[in-house]
Image (spheres, rainbow, N blue to C red):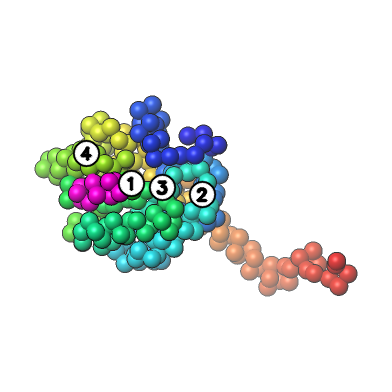
Amino acid sequence: MSKNRKMTIPNFRLMKKEGRKITVLTAYDFLVARTLDRAGIDAILVGDSVGMVFSGHETTIPVTLDEMIYHGKAVRRGVTKAALIIDMPFMSYQIGQEQALSNCGRVMKETLANAVKIEGGVEVCETVRALTRASIPVMGHIGLTPQSIHVIGGYKVQGIEEEQARKLVDDAISLQEAGCFSMVLEMIPAELSREISGKVDIPTIGIGAGPFCDGQVLVIYDMLGLNEDFKARFFKTYADLAGVIKESVNLYIDEVRSGSFPTAEHSFHLEDK
């Protein structure tokens, strides 16, 4: 989309139809969100990855609904053009449709998001139908689903085996039929993501799913090189912000200790009006 045009939910399907790739990044705070929005990103995902990269948990499971709403509100204040999508955290939608409607409705009302994202395939389709009937746009998420990490047995590629690959294709088609406007494909073989992307009319947003998806999403801290302890094959580091920050902090420490900061120009004086 143009930097001056507002991204809407119908634009997702339109961009796929026109063959234009969709760009998505995560954000968890006002300043980063505003920067991404001004740069022209199509969509911002307030991911439950916040639990790992912001709060330091080992998984996304401890993230609460209140935490997602808090970060969603902060991000919304920085966004004027990008579509804003909020992850629904673990156990905020799995118990039943009534719970899902209540919690997703609360997220939409309190964060002013454009959509929510939930994990799962065929098993969540009735919930997706209920949400879309209530005018809540839903982004699906299949492949590696981090909220199911204990069942999966770790962060590993999904869809390698034929049976699992067939299930993912069925999941994708079912999510489209249930009303999802797009879906994330996470950590699946590129050949499988190409097959799925060709079989659904809604856009696929890949993360570790190869180049054949209709768009891509990355965790902002990963692609900017802030998360030094995490390296993975599926993402590209576009900057070394951890290095820049450490260099800047070291310079600050040296200048404070040497007395070269602050100087007169950084000080207030009696003659100042």
Chain-order first, disc 4 or disc 2: 2
Q: Are marks 4 and 1 in contact (CB under 8 Å)?
A: no
Query: Which of 158/254 is in front?
Result: 158
Q: Which residues are magenta?
A: 124-134
Residue topped by disc 3? 114
Query: Which of 21/249 is in front?
Result: 21
**Alpha carbon separation for disc pair 3 and 4:** 20 Å
Q: Is residue 174 above or below residue 53?
A: above
Residue 259 in picture, x, y percent from top left: 73, 71
Q: Are marks 2 and 3 in contact (CB under 8 Å)?
A: no
Q: Residues within 10 Å of mark 2 (few under 14, many from 20)?
A: many
Residue type at mark 3?
Answer: Asn
Q: Nearer the viewer, mark 4 or mark 1?
A: 1
Chain-order first, disc 4 or disc 1: 1
Chain-order first, disc 2 or disc 3: 2
Residue topped by disc 4? 177
Residue type at mark 1?
Answer: Ser
Chain-order first, disc 3 or disc 4: 3
